[in-house]
Amino acid sequence: MTRTESEWKDAADDTNTYFNERKRSFDAKHMLLVIDDLAMRGAATQAELVEKHGTPDFIATTLGHVTTAIHGKGSVPAQDGWYSATDNPRTYRINPLFASAWKLKRRLPRSAALGE
């Protein structure tokens, strides 16, 4: 079942709440910046995220927390997940509807190309 725009807005809200509800092993503000970056880019390789934000463990932990906030424990669903990944090189592609809801939640520019 495909999520509605409203459900993706709720997912963005849930994610933000999840990161701020308790102390995390990594700094929540820094973890939120990883999601911001992925939402703005649309896709990024693991190497790009590691170079900009930290270790592979930090990136995996961040993605895992978002997954738990939205989908519960376990893996990201193959269909209608908040992101998908491919290998060679490992690349993360954020769901455009979640990215849009996330940008709205975090008051990020809606379109990097327009410089808004």
Image (tube, rainbow, N blue to C red):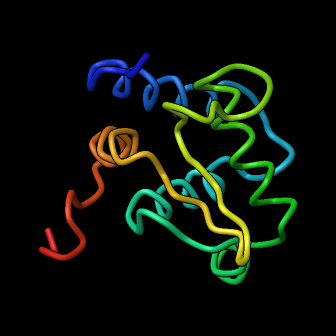
In the image, residue 59 lies at what x, y percent? 75, 60
Residue 55 falls left or right of residue 20: right
- Reply above or below: 20 against 96: above
Quadrant occupied by the C terminus: bottom left
Name the residue: 80% across, 48% down.
61
Name the residue: 58% across, 25% down.
70
Name the residue: 30% across, 20% down.
4
Q: Please state which of residues 39 and 31 is positioned toward the viewer in this rendering.
A: 39
In the image, residue 104 lies at what x, y percent? 27, 42
Quadrant occupied by the N terminus: top left
In the image, residue 27 lies at what x, y percent? 73, 52
Residue 104 falls left or right of residue 106: left
Q: Quadrant of residue 34?
A: bottom right
Q: Please state which of residues 17 and 94 is positioned toward the viewer in this rendering.
A: 94
Count of all numbered marks drawn on residues in the image: 0
Residue 25 falls left or right of residue 31: right
Q: In which quarter of the image is residue 48?
A: bottom right
Name the residue: 64% across, 56% down.
85
- Reply above or below: 21 against 87: above
